[in-house]
Image (cartoon, rainbow, N blue to C red):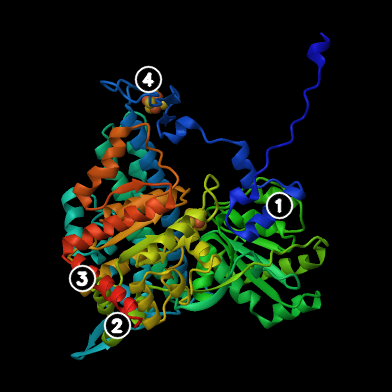
Amino acid sequence: MAEATKVKPVKAPKLADPMEASIEPATQEMIRRAQALQIETVFDRAVTMKPCAIGLQGICCKNCAMGPCRLPLPKNGIEGEDTRKGLCGATANTICARNFVRMIAAGAAAHSDHGRAVAETFLSAAKKETKDYTIKDPAKLIQIAPYFNVATTVEVDGVTKDRDIDEIALEVAEEAIKEWGKPEGTLNYLKRAPQPLQDKWEEQGVKPRNIDREIVEVMHRTHMGVDQDYKNLMKQGTRASLADGWGGAMIATDLQDVMFGSPTPLQAEANLGVMKEDHVNIIVHGHEPLLSEMIVAASQSQELIDYAITKGAKGIQLGGICCTANEVLQRHGVPPAGTFLQQELAIITGACDAMVVDVQCIFQNLANVAKCFHTKLITTHPIAKMEQENVIHIEFNEHYAMEDATRIVKMAIDNYENRGADVMIPQHKTTQIAGFGVESIKYHLGGTFRGSYYTLNDNIINGRIRGLAGVVGCNNARTKHNEEHITLIKELIKNDVLVLTTGCSAIAAGIHGLLTPEVAAVYCGPGLTEVCETVGIPPVLHLGSCVDNSRILLAATEVVKAGGLGNDLSDLPVAGSAPEWMSEKAIAIGQYFVASGVYTVFGYHMPLDGAPEFKDYLYKGMEDIYGGKWDCEPDPIKHAHKMIAHIDKKRKELGIDKARDRVLMDMADRQALGMD
Ligand code: XCC
Ligand code: SF4
């Protein structure tokens, strides 16, 4: 019996190795500090909890109470007929496809609900119900109005006159909101795509009717016993994804630009080192810029700065995490303090006086970390609260936006004096240029043909720029923080591929110093270096947040329009990538890129291995339908070369592969002659 009462020795919890967890020094330092303070972070949890092997394969169904039914692939693969089925008979293809399209629906819902909130606020602004939101970019409003069938001019006595901007705003706001639930027709913004792409969507019957409907229909079709044909399920998944990219997300971007101003390139810093020991530090985190725009304004008000000084601080320092960071960066130059995986670390500095969160990508563990410090963790959105008792909820209301923001900033200032002695801000920060958009690319690359993409196309055709890559998306604690983003981007620019980046990938690129024109000479191939040096742009262009992936779609559309590179997005030498993806939004984005004709490679892993036939459909079959397809490659160098191979294939199809050979030979010749 004595045996049985023996006390098991308590094992020390497994901890992450900081050098294995991240390639980024501030992150490594803060993981070490967290461990010294015995504060657990996502990096530690990633080593103690392994992902579920069945879920990883994408073939666990819990869509009814006869399950969960799990259909793992046999060790040696399928020999002969695949007889795996759930209790209801659902095949691996059905289960995997249902799970996949539900991810699309969740992602599309997240972006689109964000878009809806922006549209509703815009409507309030147009109705003059709120004084805090106004139209900062009337030109953008006039540019988008025709897509909503809103006239921008009016005939008075035979003379065409500009319509009143407030009238246009009101009509656009009303029309925009209808996109979520109109009973007839299809989404207005689909008209912005190249005609052949619109024709493809029409032919396939995948034009989204309204945003909410497509998401609801995914939920219906994936309910127990409804759609049991993976191709038909993907048809709906495609509709829902297009309702995101060419719908909710695109409307979010546009109306944010109208209300808060379209971004123009600006300089800012990046990384945890932007926090200041002698300032009140406020971190805004999440996705919707509605409140954070007001927090930026409040923190710049002299009254609040003076108040902060009375409390012994030298001023107020704002910083951002995740896409809220990108929103306030691209419009105001507020520096991002970190990517998705650095959110806990910002609090672990001990210098975060308030972290203000809205929606999406917010760790519930922030509340546990905040308990170890003085940090006020403030939730602000009615749909995103936390159960822990130390979390403060200040519900944001667009009608009292500035009051809410002022209250939050004051709360942070009042909290400054509660800071402990143990502040440690890692001294790592970089300089970056962010805030590119469809219009500013036009301007910078416009050359003599100002206002056109002609010069960009010309440089693609002559081969100085080999092609374009969209590198976007999250961090994932199952991969080494930032390593895939940075290795991939460096390999692409080394091979003369101009990179457009958004989301946490953009923040990572900024933190690792890839967003300055000067890096061209260090990392880029000769062609891209020449272009960047001539026009003074970085080889990696920061295009904003995740909803701003719509900017990438529109920039690519401009490239088609400028001519010489085919008639459709699928003709272009472009590729997409999310090397460290984790969120369902990434899957929605991936699918709308694929369905818009773009070859899209994800890193880490895709939850498809348990259904090889369905996987094959995404990795090959999609190309026959839309001209774009999925792929997955965890190794960032191989990943880059898959994208480059696709770009080269497209160059060949366009008959411009020879031009590039010539350019490179010219360069080599010149170098050989010492004329470079
Ligand atoms: Fe979230 Fe947009 Fe992903 Fe970053 S990149 S982890 S979704 S914040 Ni969109
Ligand atoms: Fe199992 Fe079918 Fe129910 Fe899914 S829907 S849990 S496969 S019985």
Instruction: Report crowding for label 4: few under 14, some 14 to 19, many 20 or more residues within 10 A (C-alpha).
Output: few
Q: Position of residue 16 (x, y in %)?
A: 65, 44
Q: Which residue is mark 4?
A: 87
Question: Which mark's residue is nearer the viewer, 1 or 4?
Answer: 1
Image-quarter location of ligand 2: top left
Q: Earlier in the sequence, mark 2 or mark 3?
A: 2
Q: Earlier in the sequence, mark 1 or mark 3?
A: 1
Q: Position of residue 569 (x, y in %)?
A: 24, 62
Q: Earlier in the sequence, mark 4 or mark 2?
A: 4
* Mark 3 vs 4: CB contact within 8 A: no
Q: Which residue is mark 1?
A: 32
Q: Which residue is mark 3?
A: 659
The residue tagged with tag 2: helix, strand or loop?
loop
Please give the name of the residue rendered at 26% of the width and 72% of the height, measured from the top-left corner: 665
Question: Which mark's residue is nearer the viewer, 1 or 2?
Answer: 1
Badge 4 amino acid: Leu
Badge 1 amino acid: Arg
Please give the name of the residue rendered at 20% of the width and 48% of the height, measured from the top-left corner: 625
Q: Which residue is mark 2?
A: 451
Q: Report the quarter where the C terminus lies.
A: bottom left
Quick check: 269 left or right of 303? left
Q: Position of residue 53 (x, y in %)?
A: 48, 31
Badge 2 amino acid: Gly
Q: Report the quarter where the N terminus lies.
A: top right
Instruction: Report crowding for label 2: few under 14, some 14 to 19, many 20 or more residues within 10 A (C-alpha).
Output: some
Label 1 near ligand 1 (CB < 8 Å): no
Q: Earlier in the sequence, mark 1 or mark 2?
A: 1
Number of numbered tags placed on the structure image: 4
The residue tagged with tag 3: helix, strand or loop?
helix
Question: Which mark's residue is nearer the viewer, 4 or 2?
Answer: 2
Label 1 – label 4 distance at C-alpha: 48 Å
* Mark 1 vs 3: CB contact within 8 A: no
